[in-house]
Image (cartoon, helix red, strand yellow):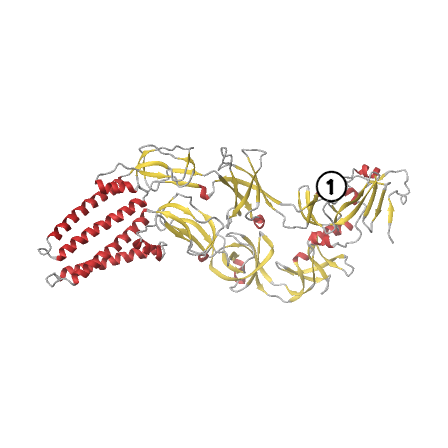
Amino acid sequence: MIRKRTIALSALVIVTATIVLAHEGHVALPTRGAQVDTEKGTIVLSRESREALDVRSVEIASGGLPEAISTYATLAAPWGKRAYASSRLPGRIARLPIKPGEKVAAGQVLAEVASLELESLQLEILTLQTDVSLARQVQDNLKKSIGSVPEIDIRDAANKVAQLENSILVSRIKWIDLGLPANVFEQLLNTAERAEITFPVLAPIGGTVVHADLLVGKIVDPAEHLFEIVDLTQVWAEIGILERDLSHIAPNQVVELTLTAYPGEVFSGTIRSVDQTLDVKNGMATAWAEFMNSTSVEPRLLPGMTGKVRVFRPSKATDTRTVPSEAVIDDGVSQYVLVEEASAEKQSEYRRRTVVIVRQSGSQTEIRSSELLPGDRVVSRGAHELGGFFPPGVLRLSPESKLTIGLKLAPAESMSVETVVTLEGSIDLPPDRRGQASTNFSGALTTLAVERGQSVTAGQVVATVASLEFQNLQLDYLRERLMISLYESQVQSLRVAPETIARRRLLDAEALLAGTKAKAESHQARLTLVGLTAQQIESITSQRKILTSLPVRAPVGGVVVALMKSLGQQLKTEEPILEIHDVSRPLVQVFVPEAAVRRIQIGQSARVRFISDSDNVHFGKVVRSARVLTAADQALSVWIEISVPQKPVRQNQLARVAIVTDSGVPTLAVPLSAIVREGTQSFVFIEKSDGTFDRVKVAIGRRNDSKIEIRSGIKSGDWIAIAGTAGLQTAYASIR
């Protein structure tokens, strides 16, 4: 039988009154002109009642709400957009055509350096040219005297000419590799006169010169950064992310930035990468968002500016709707909206529709309901007052309410409540899963082939370094290989020469050949060690091809977690450029207090929960122990290997660890999440056969990080709530 009530207060025998009090905190409910059908979930309001409550409705919006995380940010130049310029040769500043604040193009001359080393190189070339001219004259004179001079002497003269020509070839390659003009080199050879030339300092990238503390006449060396250049077409925001928010941050998310310099103005950007390590001091990670400056006006976003950001995580749901938060009614047992079924001048009809609350953000709420359609209108103003017509009766949840609170059920059963030692820990990758890419020679960083967060393989080229030492090593190798060809020819000639040729000359030539081969093999081994492939080494001799920059290779495979240097920056030998982590098999390090050391053994199983993802449990085992207690806190370092996590983990990421020390015996137990506490008493919620829930008092016993023993109050097979119990407790309180 359908139960209707006309709110005219006939049951209350107060016919002259026009309103009755609503539930506390809301406008009073009308006593006339309202008809409620609680079974159908409908309300019909007269115009007078509707106006008395000031009932208004709005159209629902399709789609969900983006979730925003608010934090602070500082603008910085991107790694590939900041560079330094240096002189590859020491010397004195002869000319400074560029000043700080000016824009430059990549390759533009920033300064000119008068270098003694450049003078020495010219002198070396002129000397070689003189020597080769004299050697050719000697060779020509000997050829004219064939028959009167030994043939071996003519061959020696030819070898001398070839050696000097090889030296000129090597000098030419060195000259060109330094970036000096080829026509000047040819001029030196043709005129045998020294050229007035300076060494150019070139801009490695295009941008604005932001720093140049130089004077004409200043003495500089290759290790000195002479200019700093920033390309301001892009800027990055360095964003601090709390560990608990890490699981919500990912590349390509939208970011809104407000800066102190421009109050009230919002700039939009996107996340480019998230650092793979956490700061051990503050437990925060860093995300990097990209913003663009207009190329038609002066850049407004400048490195060093500070402000606040909101990082938006868009809703992935396609079946959700968005309504004003005031339209959602929560009576403790269920959550619903009132849909406007009909609206006329004299009366309006509204129907109750239960919804799943997906997310709330300020004044908007994202909901899910198969009964809501595009174009539906829901009551916004006055919704909570009308909700007073539907007081909850028993603790029975709709399917939507179960989803909203995240309800999960499981039968109570017998299980072991293991004895555990609970400890705090953090991710600690072993040394063989961490690597730093470094340069084998001092020089300037010329390219960065990777970015933070990028995956790399072992041996992959991640950067290049321009180095005179590297250049000289290649030239030395080329020189030795060229000499080997000459010495082999010389030895062959001596072996077939007449007996009148002293055997001592043959032995000396063979010794010289063997020594040169040994030097060449040594140079080849060094070139291999610094990262050149066999093909690149072979091209040095076959194609006279000298690499202008030293390749820097990844020592391990993994993810780039830190970039430590900028383009053009001067590096010392073995100075790290970037760091790589292999997180495929992470370890968790915990510190065991002295009192618990005797309970911890290698091979014990463990459960690990990360602070940033506490809902998921990772299983592992104790694999290593330091076997020495630290003097500072009398604790033992122990490492636990866990299964590969589905979500990426980061160095220093915090975790809670439970090491199982005793498997225990089976007993009636439930997950910890099933227990609801009220004062000193403990309860669980049981679902009955009719779908309603009862709150049952239980006596508890032993517990660990995940389970708790139940000594009385429930029996095996009872269906209990193991998740969503906070929502059930709220619903229980609303009807009690």
Quadrant housing residue 117: top left
* Residue sitting nearer the eye, 50 or 341: 341
The image shows residue 603, relative to residue 5, as above or below, that is below
The image shows residue 99, relative to residue 420, as above or below, that is above
What kind of element bears circle 1? strand
Residue 514 x %, y %: 23, 60
Q: Identify the residue at horizontal 68%, vertical 50% (top origin).
A: 319
* Residue sitting nearer the eye, 733 or 189: 189
Residue 99 x %, y %: 39, 32
Residue 34 x %, y %: 85, 42
The image shows residue 266, relative to residue 686, as above or below, that is above
Neighbour class for label 1 at 10 Å: few (<14), some, many (≥20)? Answer: some
Q: Amino acid at mark 1?
A: Val
* Residue sitting nearer the eye, 578 or 375: 375
**What residue would you read off at disc 1?**
58
Residue 625 visible within the image: yes
Image side of residue 577 versus residue 324, left or right: left
Residue 680 x %, y %: 70, 53
Image side of residue 208 versus residue 173, left or right: right
Q: Identify the residue at horizontal 24%, vertical 49% (top origin).
A: 167
Which residue is at the far bottom?
A: 665
Q: Identify the residue at horizontal 45%, vertical 53% (top origin).
A: 580
Image quarter where the N terminus lies is bottom right
Q: Identify the residue at horizontal 90%, vertical 40% (top origin).
A: 14
Image side of residue 586 versus residue 219, left or right: right
